[in-house]
Image (spheres, rainbow, N blue to C red):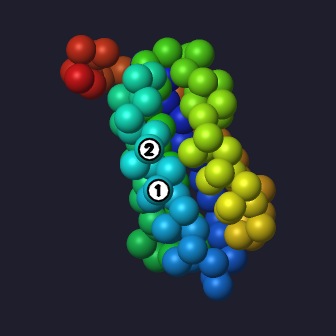
Amino acid sequence: MFIVHVFVHVKEDCIDAFKAATIENAKNSINEPGIARFDFVEQQDDPTRFVLVEVYRTADDPAKHKDTAHYQKWRDTVADMMAEPRSALKFYNVHPDEEGWD
């Protein structure tokens, strides 16, 4: 598994629109064969900060995800909502093993 945590800080007046666009993207993303999980969470003490937890089956699957129409729509829709550029950290799973993700 290949796991990406994407950190997003949005402008305060864009919170609702960002949530709507990101939920739509997440719902479509989880249907991709290369994605095991696609979670979208909001920071409790700062509603302008979000994390996307993307769990891919292989290291090649993020590139396939970025080729989808729903990702490109999301990217273009939320670009001006960002308070700063988004950042990401990449991980490999330790536990559960790959069979535990199914």
41 or 29: nearer the viewer: 29
Where residue 25 appears, x then y in whole percent?
Answer: 50, 50
In the picture shown, does residue 49 fall above or below 11? above
Q: Secondary structure at mark 1?
A: helix
- Residue 26 visible in rendering: yes
Left/right placement of residue 41 relative to residue 15 reads left
In the picture shown, does residue 85 fall above or below 36? below
Question: Which label was assigned to residue 28?
Answer: 2
Extreme-front residue of the structure: 69
Left/right placement of residue 76 relative to residue 65 reads right
Where residue 51 appears, x then y in whole percent?
Answer: 51, 54
Left/right placement of residue 36 relative to residue 49 reads left
Q: Residues within 10 Å of mark 2 (few under 14, many from 20)?
A: some
Q: Secondary structure at mark 2?
A: helix
Q: Amino acid at mark 1?
A: Glu
Extreme-bottom residue of the structure: 13
Location of mark 1 (residue): 24
Q: Residues within 10 Å of mark 1 (few under 14, many from 20)?
A: some
Instruction: Give the quadrant of the C terminus.
Output: top left
Instruction: Give the quadrant of the N terminus.
Output: top left
Structural distance between the alpha carbons of marks 1 and 2 = 6 Å
Question: Which label was assigned to residue 95?
Answer: none
- Residue 90 visible in rendering: no
Where residue 85 appears, x then y in whole percent?
Answer: 77, 56
Asked if disc 1 and disc 2 are in contact, CB closer than 8 Å, the reply is: yes
Where residue 56 appears, x then y in whole percent?
Answer: 46, 26
Residue under the point 62% across and 53% down: 74
In the picture shown, does residue 92 fall above or below 32? above
Q: Amino acid at mark 2?
A: Asn
Residue under the point 40% across and 23% down: 33
Residue under the point 68% across and 61% down: 77
Residue under the point 42% across and 72% down: 44
